[in-house]
Image: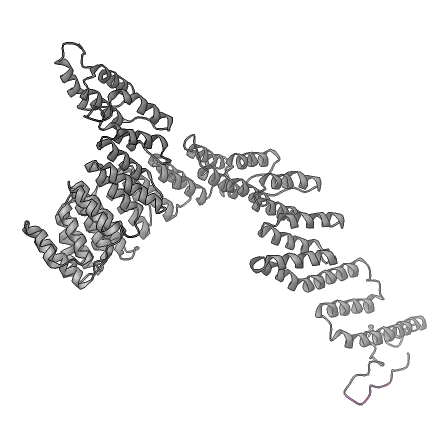
Amino acid sequence: PPPRPPPPPPNDELDVSHPMPRPPRCKRHPVTRSNHHHRRRSLKWDESREKGSEEAKRSLARSQGSEEDAGMEKQQASMARGNGGRGRGVWFRRKREEAQKTRQEQELEPLLALIHDGYHRNSKRAIEVFETLRADGSLTTTQVCNRVMSMLAEHQLWRQADSLYRDMISQGAEMTVATLASLANAHAKAGRAYEAERLIFETMQEHGLRPNPRAITPVLMAFVRSHRWEGALRLLRRMKCIGINPTSINYNVVIQGVLRSPSKSGSRFPMANSLVMEMECRNDPRMPDTLSYSLLTDRAMREGRWRESVDIFKRMSSRSLQPDGVAIAQILQTCGKARKWQAATELFNVVTKPVPYVYGAMLKAMTDCGEWSRVIYYLRECIMDPSVPTPNQVMFNIALDAAARHGPSHAVLEVLKMMQENDVAKTAITYNTLLNAFASKNRWQKAEQVVESMSRANANADIVTYNTLMKAYRQSGEARRAHSLLLLMLGVESYTLSSLSSSSPSLARSLSMLLKHLQQNPVAPDVITFAEAIQACANGGEARLGLRIYDKNVAAKDSSIVIVGAALGCCAKVGDWAKALRIFHASSSAMLQQNAVTVASLVGACAKGSHWQIGLEIVKRAPVINEVAFNNLLAYMGCENNMPSFMADKVMAIMRARGFTPDVRTYRRLVAGFAREREWKRVSELEIKAKDLGLNLGQSAKRCYQLGKQLPTYNYSVP
């Protein structure tokens, strides 16, 4: 046997020049081995001693290096000792390259983080770092390039992405689907949809790659964002032609583009519905998903297609898809707007576990249908349902709205009693809901009672409360009450109010109640308050009072287009065309954007003031106008000192030239104008034409024929 190595030194530190050799592997016959075997073994021990000493020397240097390199070197040395160095080759080279790539990525990690953060904070600095990396040749691995390419795509830097792609081609880097998908995403986010399509389908084919549906999704979104749904639909068909099965995400993007793009030729709901049916025919349980049906139900709700909404719900149920609460609520709202409470009830009975906002949608649908008794029924069902928490204030407000609009007085009391039993507090929103419901039905007495009950319940009335009360006065034509409430909010002296209320005891009682409210909680009037008060004066036959309110409180201050419209409406009531022109020019000088309402009121003031020529010029040149302006101009045709009947054809020609079609009100004004000048032949022609168009002129034409029969010159028969 070979001689034993010397013993280790006495100190604790290991002497790297004398490593301990490994004992022989064979323990069965340690002595009876051939001399050739021992000679070969001794040679291997000497070689092991030399390699061991070199390894021990490198261990000190490796202690300060990276752990991955140390682990790889250690594994390499152990394999070399185990099989005499025969394991070196492809495996070691691959591991070494992977370690180099990992080391390079670790070195580039701070720079990549700087690029990513720089796009959000300082894009110029981020681009400089990117150009530095590319100039130094640091972007060599495909993985790093793909990461940088995705960052460039995220921030729409398609020019830098193109430059990086050309560098990768020149360096012979490997192209992957992720690389070209990121490049196409950069072009797609920058709005270059056709260039992104070329990269996906043509450039990938040149590199021998096959695009996947995930890479095509950004291109579809680019077409959708630019409102080119035809391109998205064509791209979807192209995917099928080359054998790529679109996913539900691809279909949903196209459906969204079809539904949300502006249309001049009508609704695109049938096209979107056909795409969903196309997914259903593929017999894939993952297609269509809930989002596909939700997009359809949302569009059906906007267009009032209640039959299609119910059909969509049945199709979802047949595919074992449980619609979410949002989709069910949309379908119920669609049925409510179409006043189909039977369909809403049938749909609600199918729902297994209705959530609270589904109950709210059902209550709103029944309110729109005018079924106040069913609103109270479903509210009680919601209270008794153990799976639903206690109804919130919104549900009770919907029930109060339904009871006040469509039900008797005891229905409101019943809902208020239910609120008290379920410990739901009555807030200002609750009282404002009641006020709005009574105001919509012209029940201003009930509205005043609601305000009085707020004082008893210690609820503070806000500006919405007084504006809603003013709305009740406006719709009922109570000009004096609206004026008195406005003076109270402005803080006018008491003797002025007493002089206003001296003629009416009920007005005095209302003013005392409102004065007590405003003394406890003062509220200043806003733009809506002034507009409602002026319109109330116009509706109540006190148009001059409304103009005085405008001159005294609004004209010297910053006005609003709402107040201007109300003041012009007062001018149209009294025919004060000069004041209407002054108000219109003053508001235009104040940089207020005029709308169709103000223009129509101005034309009406000019027509009633016997200055129809000015009104005719306005309807010719006004940038914003509607058919109401033409109807206001024709309303006084044939009157004394007003537009003659032979100008009717010219007005109708201007109306059609500006893109408006005459409706029933237009024909009625024409019939009345020709009847004032006793042109019975034109009256007959208009009635025949209106009948051909399917328009019913009502009793106005019959009265004209009765007058025409009294004249011996004409002999017309009533159709």
Quarter that holds the C terminus: top left
- Please provide percent x and percent y for residue 71: 73, 69
Q: Which residues are magenta?
A: 6-11
Q: Is residue 89 above or below residue 629?
A: below
- Please provide percent x and percent y for residue 374: 21, 44
In the image, taking residue 169 as reference, residue 277 lies left or right, namely left
Which residue is at 30% across, 38% downward?
597
In terms of depth relative to the viewer, which is nearer, 534 or 706?
A: 534
- The reply to whether residue 471 is in sight is no
In the image, taking residue 323 as reference, residue 196 lies left or right, namely right
Which residue is at 45% across, 44% downward?
291
Which residue is at 18% across, 53% downward?
486
In the image, taking residue 126 as reference, residue 526 lies left or right, namely left
- Please provide percent x and percent y for residue 611: 25, 31
Q: Is residue 111 above or below residue 576?
A: below
Quarter that holds the N terminus: bottom right
